[in-house]
Image (cartoon, rainbow, N blue to C red):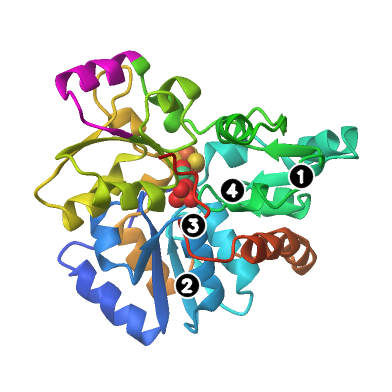
Amino acid sequence: MTAPVRENLTGLDLRAEIDRLRKERNAVILAHYYQKPEIQDLADFVGDSLELSRKAADTDADVIAFCGVKFMAETAKILSPEKIVILPDMDAGCSLEDSCPPEQFARFRAQHPDHIALTYINCSAAVKALSDIIVTSSSAETIISQIPEDQPIIFGPDRHLGGYLNRKFGREMLLWPGVCIVHEAFSETELLKLKAQHPGAPVAAHPECPPHIVDHADYVGSTSGILQFAKTFPGDTLIVATEPHIIHQMELALPEKNFIGAPGADGNCNCNICPYMALNTMEKLYIALRDLQPRIEMDEELRLAARKSLDRMLEMASGTVGKGDLGRA
Ligand code: 13P
Ligand code: SF4
């Protein structure tokens, strides 16, 4: 995997150095909710995939330091090509992106010429370039409801999100067979045991979870949707079936409430930490801001092709984040 940080940074006040460099570089630090708490705490903005895309498109900073995974930083570069976009660890990939090689996706498309390709943002720039409309989990509902019912659709790469949308909207989208290794790891048996220990505690789940988890959820939605639910549910304990670093924001907002990560098969939630998101560290962020490397670079033809489907998402998702969320009452 990735090369370890070999420099000896002992004694350096990383937080102070990152603050100094962000000013010197006129950099904005964007972080996803699945980042380590220390990175969330220093970021200029923490958000879900759609919110982070919007921030990247709107910023007047010269440098975007993207604390998330590679497809997110690539999205920032596609939308803001004149900016320097750095990702602390270039190996921060995503199992959904890996599941969908562009050549195979192109063949799948070619086999279904009457279908449009509605594609989850968790994919490579090359797959975005082969797609008609991108969605995030917080914009998928708004966007799908604007597509005529008789329009056939292929949906990739997350079969669980696609299946959830099919069930909710009565559609028959053809699904690419990708999964998120993190959300796939929740255990139904362990979740039921946890629910029995906390009678009445609602479950909030991300739609990347398989149906045997989503079926037990009181709320299904994006990371920002789950956070909103956590801020408004009436009880005192919430079971959270998504990557557990989001619980940091819940604890900051509602320190008096109890947030429990849904377990994996071993009975705890360590297997549900995203190994790609976890590659970003304070040390690597400091080095990236100092050296302006590793940097996202992209062929202009590819960027322009990928931008079309992303622009369509931003247009169709317009309105506030959460309005088109997948939330279930
Ligand atoms: P959100 O858009 O809900 O933040 O999801 C991103 C992601 O990668 C979930 O695994
Ligand atoms: Fe990809 Fe899953 Fe990690 Fe999200 S949590 S970045 S979908 S591997």
Is 305 on the left-hand or right-hand side of 68?
Answer: right
Q: Which residue is mark 2?
A: 64
Residue 117, labelled with which disc?
A: 1
Type of the residue with mark 1? Ala
Instruction: Identify the residue shown where x is 64% and y is 52%.
Output: 143
Tell me the element at label 3: loop
Tell which tag, 3 or 1, sits nearer the viewer.
3
What whole-number distance in Å separates the C-alpha atoms at marks 4 and 3?
11 Å
Residue 169 lies, with reference to residue 304, above or below; the image says above
Type of the residue with mark 4? Ala
Q: Which residue is mark 3?
A: 323
What whole-number distance in Å separates the C-alpha atoms at marks 4 and 1?
13 Å
Residue 140, labelled with which disc?
A: 4
Question: Which segment did they paint magenta?
Answer: 189-203
Q: Residues within 10 Å of mark 4 (few under 14, many from 20)?
A: many
Q: Earlier in the sequence, mark 4 or mark 2?
A: 2
Q: Earlier in the sequence, mark 3 or mark 1?
A: 1
Give residue 155's position: percent from left, percent from top.
69, 38
